[in-house]
Image (tube, coloured by chain):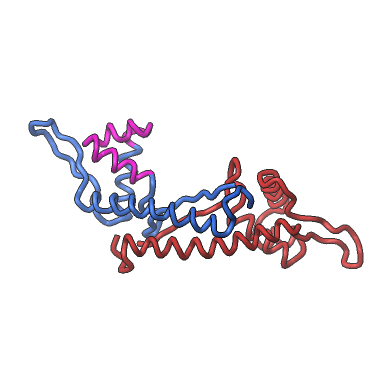
Chain colours: A red, B blue
Amino acid sequence: MKIAYKVWLDNNGKAFGDGPCELLQRVEKTKSLHQAACQMGMAYSKAWRLIQMVEKRLGFALIERKIGGRSGGGSNLTPQAKELMEKFVRFRKDAEWVLEKTYRKHFGSGGRH
Amino acid sequence: MKIAYKVWLDNNGKAFGDGPCELLQRVEKTKSLHQAACQMGMAYSKAWRLIQMVEKRLGFALIERKIGGRSGGGSNLTPQAKELMEKFVRFRKDAEWVLEKTYRKHFGSGGRH
């Protein structure tokens, strides 16, 4: 037996969780929503709609597109998206730890319920 | 913005969470799986299948039926079910508290992300 959980931010509906967080992390690395979506096995249109929905729920932009230029354009995270992503990653790690600890406190660690 | 989460016990699949816990609590109070299901707006057949599935995942019986007798029968929790339910309720309460605390630590309490 083990503990399982899902944790997300809510703002009049599901606003930000593991999926959007991973997508943003990959956008930050690849500078491309196309590539980020592809790496997650997600259609680009789905990724784009997801970002739009999250932006609406949060009330700020997550991704800014650079058009043309020497690098041929690409996507970047807004400063607010970066801050949110970093906070969420730290929060997520901490949440995992405290939940695991709370589980052990109540159910022990020997596999008994 | 606020934190939202789901937490459950996993044993090769979802084994025990809020739904089964509430069902057991209501069986304990009403001594009837029929009434417990009804109170939760759940069909009896669905409640019965849920109990069966959870029993299979956990590896022990949750409900024992008393047939006939002065009270005309009814359902009771097994000692193991009662123990699990009580542990889960305490765990759930603790988990809520630590998650809320962890959220405030990372996101503050003023409604900012």
Q: Using the image, determine if residue B69 lies above or below residue B107.
A: above
Residue drawn at the location 34% of the way across and 45% of the way down: B20
Residue drawn at the location 56% of the way across and 48% of the way down: B2
Q: Main secondary structure of the magenta part?
A: helix
B14 or B93, nearer to the observer:
B93
Residue A80 forms part of the magenta stretch: no
Residue range (magenta): B19-45
* Quadrant into which the C terminus of chain A falls: bottom left
Residue B16: x percent and y percent?
36, 51
Residue drawn at the location 33% of the way across and 46% of the way down: B21
B27 or B14, nearer to the observer:
B27
Kindly indicate the quadrant of the structure image that contains residue A30: bottom right
Residue B84: x percent and y percent?
28, 53
Q: Residue furthest right?
A: A69
Residue drawn at the location 40% of the way across and 56% of the way down: B13
Left or right of A53, for residue A68:
right
Left or right of B91, for residue B111:
right
Q: Using the image, determine if residue A1 lies above or below residue B21.
A: below
Q: Residue furthest left?
A: B70
Residue B22 forms part of the magenta stretch: yes
Residue A7: x percent and y percent?
52, 54
Kindly indicate the quadrant of the structure image that contains residue B26: top left
* Quadrant into which the N terminus of chain A falls: bottom left
Q: Using the image, determine if residue A70 lies above or below residue B84.
A: below
Residue B85: x percent and y percent?
29, 50
Left or right of A97, for residue A20:
right
Left or right of B19, for residue A57:
right
Q: How many marks?
A: 0
